[in-house]
Image: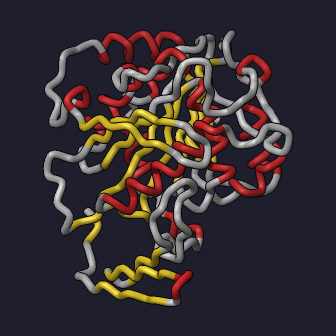
Amino acid sequence: MKKLCATVLALAAALCNIPRAHAVDVKNSHGDYYEHEETGETIPYRLILPDDYDEKYRFPLVVFFHGAGERGHENERQLDNCVQQIADNMPKAIILVPQCSHNKQWVDTPWSDGSYSTEEVPESDKMIAAMALVEQIMQEYSVDRDCVYAAGISMGGYGVWDAMIRHNEVFAAGVAVCGAGDPSKAEILKDTPMFVYHGTADATVPVSGSEEMVAAIEAVGGTKVRYTALEGEGHGIWGFVFDQKDLYRELKKCKLTDRGIDPYAVKEEPEGNKMLPYILAGGGVLLAAAAVGIVLAVKGKKKKAV
């Protein structure tokens, strides 16, 4: 566990306020709305593509879960925190930023309670819809499925832990800031790289939320979790966190195949979607219409990862 003091944070905050040139301005990104049939949820989302996006190559995907203050339906507020920093530090990545509506949460549990049980708290409708959206984006865009990452702050920190537990086969790594999860599911995350940050004086989400997850993962033999405690700091630490160059250096190294997971194995159709099941293998796409016993193979060149 790494500890950082308030003086370091103050200096970092000052540096964050220095104007910078952005290769991609996230405010000018593509915005749309995804309708999930099963839950009836509509998810506004922004999609930030690298300025050199080319379908001949596969690009990493970062899914960012925002905090409670960025909830809404206008499809703008979710860009307020951290997204530009991610785009600046990962210019070769596609970034997906879904927006949770007012009075809804990525995880239906009180933030002040810290840890929760996924057995007692079902996956929220918003998270179900968001994960279906992730699958659709991976189908429609040239995503390197070996390098899909979840990141989130506060309410979104809960979202990261929840997504990493329930959909561990999708994400190569997670960045959970001021969040909490289900320590009883630590075995699932034993081999998953997790970058965890929390202020020790957080009065909104108790620091125990992160500490209990980290301790549980380490107790089952996990060695891929990196926890940074920000001594004396409160809740709003994310500006500092997402300005850390070493975070991005380490994140980019993480791959699903390092955990023995084949990211291009058979995938079922996303819930609420009408798309057919598919297989991505050897650069080709195999569409299977099982109901009528028809198999259609579409060949293509294998794409290189950027």
| Residue ranking furthest to the front | 292
Of 302 and 252, the residue lying toward us = 302
Q: Is residue 251 left or right of residue 223?
A: left
Q: Position of residue 152 (x, y in %)?
A: 52, 33
In this picture, residue 205 sits left or right of residue 185? left
Q: Quadrant of the C terminus?
A: bottom left
Quadrant of the drawing holding the N terminus? top right
Relative horizontal placement of residue 253, taking residue 112 as reference (left or right): left
**Residue 252 x %, y %:** 39, 53
Residue 113 falls in which quadrant of the image? top right
**Residue 1, placed above or below residue 291:** above
Q: Closest to the observer: 194 or 44?
A: 44
Q: Is residue 152 visible?
A: yes
Q: In percent of the image, x 63 and y 39: which residue is there?
A: 125
- Residue at (36, 79) in percent of width and height: 285
Identity of the residue drawn at 46% across and 75% down: 278
x and y percentages locating residue 4 in the rendered image: 55, 22
* Residue drawn at x 79%, y 37% as measured from the top left: 121
The picture places residue 10, in percent across and down from the top left corner, at 43, 10
Q: Nearer the viewer, residue 207 or 127?
A: 127
Residue 291: image quadrant is bottom right
Question: Does 2 sit left or right of 253 as displayed?
Answer: right
- The way the protein has been coloured in the rendering is secondary structure
Residue 2 visible to the viewer: no
Q: How many marks?
A: 0
Tell me: residue 194, above or below residue 260: above
